[in-house]
Image (spheres, rainbow, N blue to C red):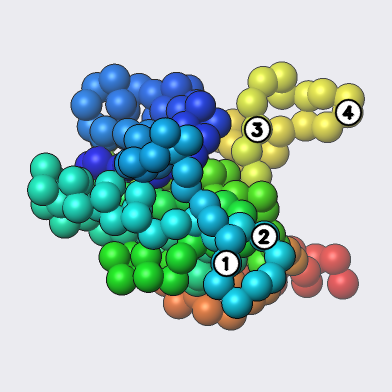
Amino acid sequence: MRISIVTIFPEMVEVVKKYGVIAQAVEEGIVEINVVNLRDYTTDKHKTVDDYQYGGGYGMVMKPEPFFRFYESYVEKYGKPYVILTSPQGRVFNYKIAEKLSKKRDIVIFCGRYEGIDERVMKIVDDEISIGDYILTGGELPAMVITDAIVRLVPGVVKRESVERESFHQGLLDHPVYTRPYEYKGMKVPDVLLSGDHQKVELWRRKESIKKTIMKRPDLFLKKELDELDKLAIIELFKELMKGC
């Protein structure tokens, strides 16, 4: 997979590929992450990427020419990529979107700034994505969030078992996790996790996932299609409730 992030602040974005499993994936050649300075695609001596908006109004607008110059040179070199514009007007990013994007081979992310990008650039944009209903000073942080979420789902970056167990993959929040010491400040690790009985551990984890999802994100639970393990876990939850009666 190749991801190219187009920005006027490349130094800000470079860190996305320098740490953790993403850095390892880049080093191993599983993914290629390029950070492109949009100013390299300007033609004036000041490397201008913005101008006043037609019709008047507050703030500057990013010019179309640098985006098109970058895009045309990219297509000539690699072929057509899937182009994402980070925008508060886009669809809100989630796990399912990340999964679908992780299957694409070539992604370009445009980082907006100022009052936005000239509307004509939308001709080469395939998708607008927002990371939430709020406004940031630019599209660099959303681009980094999107990149991180996509790359970790690419096969070989994170162990498949870890991905399959994490929050949202099965439509549930993740179960509680523990490590040493066994007891800390009077709080103990649940004994089932030390039992060595893998079936009991799996049932406990699913039960706790369901409990946490119902408490924190009931909207997710209402969308969940229950499998056999879910049903067994719900029975265990009901038994616990009955004991407390």
Going from the N terminus, do you reach mark 3 or mark 2 first? 2
In terms of depth relative to the viewer, which is nearer, 38 or 48?
48
In terms of depth relative to the viewer, which is nearer, 145 or 52?
52
Badge 2 amino acid: Gly
Q: Which mark is residue 199?
A: none
Q: Which residue is mark 3?
A: 178
Going from the N terminus, do you reach mark 2 or mark 4 first? 2
In terms of depth relative to the viewer, which is nearer, 240 or 206?
206
- Is there a contact, CB below 8 Å, between mark 4 and mark 1? no
Badge 3 amino acid: Tyr
For the residues labelled 3 and 2, the Cα–Cα distance comes to 50 Å
Label 2 SS: loop
Q: Which mark is residue 186?
A: 4
For the residues labelled 4 and 3, the Cα–Cα distance comes to 14 Å
The residue located at (45%, 77%) in the rendering is 225
In which quadrant will I find the C terminus? bottom right
Residue 170 location in percent, x, y?
Answer: 45, 61
Residue 63 location in percent, x, y?
Answer: 44, 57
> Which class describes the residues within 10 Å of circle 1: few (<14), some (14-19), or many (20+)?
some
- Is there a contact, CB below 8 Å, between mark 1 and mark 2? yes
Badge 1 amino acid: Gln
Going from the N terminus, do you reach mark 4 or mark 1 first? 1
Q: Which mark is residue 53?
A: 1
Badge 4 amino acid: Gly
Q: Which residue is mark 2?
A: 59
Compared with 146, 58 (above or below) is below
Compared with 121, 23 (above or below) is above
Label 3 SS: loop
The residue located at (15%, 51%) in the rendering is 75
> Which class describes the residues within 10 Å of circle 2: few (<14), some (14-19), or many (20+)?
few
